[in-house]
Image (spheres, rainbow, N blue to C red):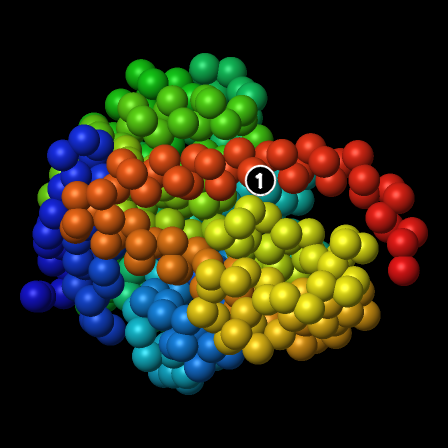
Amino acid sequence: MTNGEFRLICEDKQTRARAGQLCTAHGVVDTPVFMPVGTRGSVKACTPRDLYEIGAGIILGNTYHLYLRPGHRIVEQAGGLHNFMAWRKPVLTDSGGFQVFSLGPLRTIGEEGVEFRSEIDGSKHFISPERSIEIQNALGADIIMTFDECPPLPNSYEYLEKSMEMTARWAARCKAAHANPRQLLFGIVQGGMEMKLRKRSIEATVDIGFPGYAIGGLSVGEDKHLMYETLAYVAPLLPGNQPRYLMGVGTPEDLVYAVACGVDMFDCVMPTRNARNGWLFTTLGPVRIRNAEYKNDFTPLDPNCFCYTCQNFTRAYLRHLHRENEILGHSLLTRHNLHFYLSLMRGVRRAILDESFSLMRGGIRKLAMLGQELKDRTAVKDESLSTNP
């Protein structure tokens, strides 16, 4: 395979799910794939060796944060993110758009780009589409993203339309500024929950031409049924012979639903952030490890899991580490959650290839119901549990 080639291997007969391979400068990525998030040049609480061992095929870095610290020129002097992080597999960097626009009153949006103040020291900065590409070219990721506006929701149709049109103009400027053919530049589709705007965004972005396309602006506060409706509409309209990437989503059931819609690539901070907060994903349903019921529980976190954490440590010990805020606890819990997500994606891929995806999808729905039941029960118990020894 050549750099940038996307090969479809199998398509599910009952859904739009598909298994494929994407060739990048640092290796071939099997899809569907989940990308652990390494915001500042590291996946929190994980070493690169941990990531290799749990089977991560590609990770994500954040342009905005790496631009602020240590600075993209320092990363470039180190030989790019791969050398800087000691990570030899593929890397994707987002454009920084979501982080810039989430700054709210600290930023001002204009046709040329965005002026903002750093949340670190209050210093002024300006990022244009050209500047975002310049930064990402210096970082050296295998896949980079166009600079887009992720509009807050809810919002007026008029604002969403203007934002979508500007995002399309910015995408054209990003493509013109892109200077490294080894890096695959993906376009981003916006338009909020408005299907007409989404369709127009797809047409404009595809007309510019990119080797892959991302769905942005979902999981930003809207009701889940709206996210699912939008996703089911948007994903099939994207080119079928190129990778489709859903940005910043989500729960295990979200990922499986999106795969059924035809999405190939995912990233989300949920497995790592939830791990640090003591919320673990297991094949038996979610576990809140700080709860008192695990104080004397000397069984594995997940008896069906083969990760290092589950093969060596008990729920009682993991609860102790979490309650004491021990760094080892963050590491072990993060490793488990990422193993769960990556194993889920590998299982989804196998199910597509084995023509058993619909059966697997039913099992994930049951797991989601268990999770909601636990969430409802925990909401009632949390206050009393927080005072338990």
Residue 181 lies left or right of residue 246; in this view the side is left
- Where 201 falls versus 40 (above or below)? above
> Is residue 332 shown to the viewer in this render?
yes
Q: Position of residue 308 (x, y in %)?
A: 51, 75
How many neighbours does mark 1 have within 10 angstroms: few (below 14), some (14-19), or many (20 or more)?
Answer: some
Q: Position of residue 230 (x, y in %)?
A: 37, 25
Near-viewer residue (192 or 317): 317
Element type at mark 1: helix
- Where 262 falls versus 327 (above or below)? above
Near-viewer residue (221 or 179): 221
Near-viewer residue (112 or 300): 300
- Where 93 falls versus 200 (above or below)? below
Q: Position of residue 167 (x, y in %)?
A: 36, 36
Q: Residue at x 11, y 58 (%)?
A: 5
- The residue under label 1 is which amino acid type? Gly
Residue 309 lies left or right of residue 349; in this view the side is right
Farthest-out residue, left: 1
Q: Which residue is labeled 1 in the image?
A: 371
Classify the position of the C terminus by image quarter. Answer: bottom right
Classify the position of the N terminus by image quarter. Answer: bottom left
Residue 293 figure quarter: bottom right
Residue 111 lies left or right of residue 303; in this view the side is left
Q: Position of residue 387 (x, y in %)?
A: 92, 52
Q: Residue at x 17, y 43 (%)?
A: 355
